[in-house]
Amino acid sequence: MVEFYRGPIAGRDKGAVCLSGHRRLTIFSLAACVAYTAAYYFDWPLFRYYLVSRRFSFGIQPDSAGAPILWYGWLVAAILAGVLAAAIMPRGAALRLPPDLLWIVPVTSVFAALLYEARWFL
């Protein structure tokens, strides 16, 4: 363990932070996780980025544009879904969510991604 030259710096380490007051963050996280998994699994990007031509496109470009990068579209779709869900969900709704959702949703999303990617290995 390394110590600071003149002792610890005051105000740097706040210790453990309680996130129970951030209910909208929980709603955002769950909705974004579900939206990202759906966008990835069903290939629904909001847009595509073509690296060769350095352009964003809402539609499919000809083969001369190169291979599209879909990840940006999936990520923006997940962020928008999370923000929308957090904005329209009443505050009390997050309190009524079962705590098991905080681990069931991500584990299910990882399982869906593994099922989708199994096609490359089978």
Image (cartoon, rainbow, N blue to C red):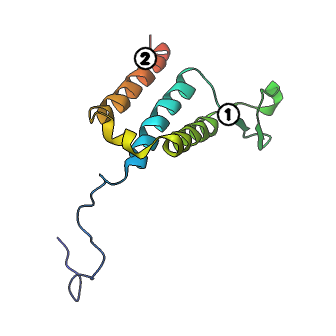
* Label number found at residue 46: 1
Instruction: Identify the image quadrant of residue 110.
Output: top left
The residue type indicated by label 2 comes to Leu
Farthest residue, direction left = 1
In which quadrant will I find the C terminus?
top left
The residue type indicated by label 1 comes to Leu
| Mark 2 residue element | helix
Residue at 37% over, 30% down: 105
Instruction: Identify the image quadrant of residue 21.
Output: bottom left
Residue highlighted by disc 2: 115
Q: Earlier in the sequence, mark 1 or mark 2?
A: 1
Crowd class of label 1 (few under 14; some 14 to 19; many from 20; radius 10 Å): some
| Mark 1 residue element | loop
Please tell me which residue lies in front, 55 or 32.
Answer: 32
Relative placement, left or right, of 92 versus 86 is left
Residue at 78% over, 28% down: 59
